[in-house]
Image (cartoon, rainbow, N blue to C red):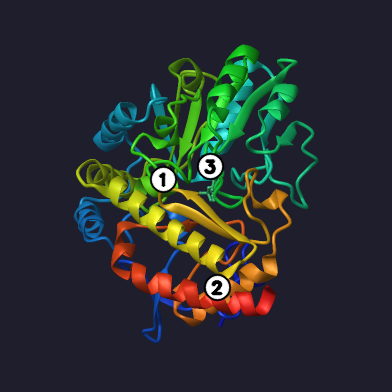
Amino acid sequence: MNYLAGKVNSPIPIPSYYPSDIVSGTGAYVINKDGQRYIDLWMGYGALLFGHADIEIVDAVKNEIEKGWFFSYQTSLEKELSGIINSIIPSAETVRFATTGSDAAAYAIRLSRAQTNRKKVLSIIGGYHGVHENMIPSKGILDNDFLNLVPFNNIEAIEEKLVNNDYACLVMEPILANSGCTPPESDYLKKIRDICTKTGTILVFDEVVTGFRVDLGGAQKLFNVIPDISVFSKAIASGFPLSVICGKKEILENFIPSGQVFFAGTFNASPISLVVAKVVINKLKNSNFYQTNIELGDNLMRYISDQILELGLLASVQGVASMLTIAFGCKTFNSGVVLENINISAYNSFISKMAKRNILLPPLHTETIFLSPVHSAVLDDIKKAIRESLQEIKNEYY
Ligand code: PMP
C-alpha cells in the first residue's frame, strides 16, 4: 500500500532496482523488511557522519527524551549550543537555530535584503539552497526576477554581476555538492570574499552539506574564507532536524524581536536535535574523524581514478575528503556536472550494477557519495563492486 503522492516524499524517484522497504540501519548498512543488507553510500544525504544508529547518539536521545522533549520556553541547551557554535565556526558571532536547510537559507536571503536594502540575489548554477520561493524554479512559483545564476569557479562572471553594487547577497556552497562534488579552484573563494566586500554584497556560505563534514569549522575554516552569514544543517545533528543561521552580529541582530526581520518556527531548537548536536560536536572534537575520513575518501577516489584509467573509460571521479562523485561522459567537471555533457544513462546503469551487488549510491547523478569512518570495514567490498560494475559499463558503453 502506498498512498504517497507520486509514490515518494522527495523529488527523486526511486529506481525500480532500489529497495523501497528499508526498515533499519546499522553502521554502514541499511536493511530492508526481508533482512537484506545494503552498504549505504548516500548516508542520509550526508547527514550521518558516524553511520546509522551510532550508539552514543542513540543513548543521548534515550536519555534526553525521558526529560521531556519540547518546551516553548528558552532552554539552557540552546544557549549552551549557541556558545559552542560561536567557538568553532569562524563566522558565527551570533547564532539562531531553525529546523531545515531551506529555512536557514531563506532567512539568510531575507536578512541580506534587510541589511542592504537591495533585492537581487546571485547564486551558482547547479547549487541548491532549498525549497523556498526565492531560489527554486517550479510551476506554481511566481517568476523570480531577482535571482541570477553564474557558473561555479568562474570569478569573472561574479565580478560582472556584482559590479553595479546592486545585489543583496551571493548565496553559494563553498564546495559545490549539488551538481556533483566540485571543489573551489585555488583562491576562488578568497577572490569572492574581496569582491563581495568591495561591492557591499553579503556573502552567504550555504554549508548545509559541507558543515561539520569537511572540517569542524566548516569549509570556511578549511579554505580560510569568512562569509558574512553561514547556514548549516544535515550533519550537525546527524539526521535529526536542526539548522543554524549564524554570522555577523550586526546582521543577525536584525531578526525580531531585536530587529525587524521576521523569524519563527515551532520546532526550532528542538532539545533532542540540540542534544544530538552536542554529542556530534564532542565526537568530532575527540576523535580522528577527519583524518580517517580524508584517508578513506582519498583512498577510494584514487582507486576509482585508477580503474577509470585502466579501463579507458570517459569518466571522472572527484571530491573533497569524504564527499565524492563519479561522472560518466567527461574527464573533469570544474563547474559542476549540470554544465557538462554527462552520460546520465551510464550513471544509472552503473548504480543499478552496484545495487545488484547490494551497494546503494545516490540515485541521482548530481548527488554526492558520502563516506563515514564506518565504511572502512567494507571498503574492499565497495572497491570490488566498483571494479566489476565499471568493467560491465565498459562493455556496454565504451
Ligand atoms: N542547502 C544545501 C546546500 C542543500 O544541499 C540542501 C538540501 N539538500 C538544502 C540547502 C535544503 O535543506 P533541507 O532539505 O533541509 O531543507
Please name the residue shown 29% across and 30% down the image: 79
Please name the residue shown 42% across and 25% down the image: 91
User: Residue 319: x and y, percent?
Assistant: 49, 50
Please name the residue shown 39% across and 31% down the image: 221
For disc 3, the marked residue is: 183
- The span from disc 2 to disc 1 (Cα, nearest Å) is 38 Å
For disc 2, the marked residue is: 390
Q: In this view, does 275 lie above or below 395?
A: above
Q: Quadrant of residue 364?
A: bottom right
Q: Nearer the viewer, mark 3 or mark 1?
A: 3
Q: Residues within 10 Å of mark 2 (few under 14, many from 20)?
A: many
For disc 1, the marked residue is: 242
Amino acid at dot 1: Leu
Q: In which quarter of the image is residue 384?
A: bottom left
- The span from disc 2 to disc 3 (Cα, nearest Å) is 24 Å
Q: Does the residue labelled 1 lie within 8 Å of ligand 1?
A: no
Q: Which of marks 2 and 3 is nearer the N terminus?
A: 3
The answer to whether the residues at label 3 and label 1 have Cβ atoms under 8 Å apart is no
Amino acid at dot 3: Pro
User: Residue 106: x and y, percent?
Assistant: 58, 36
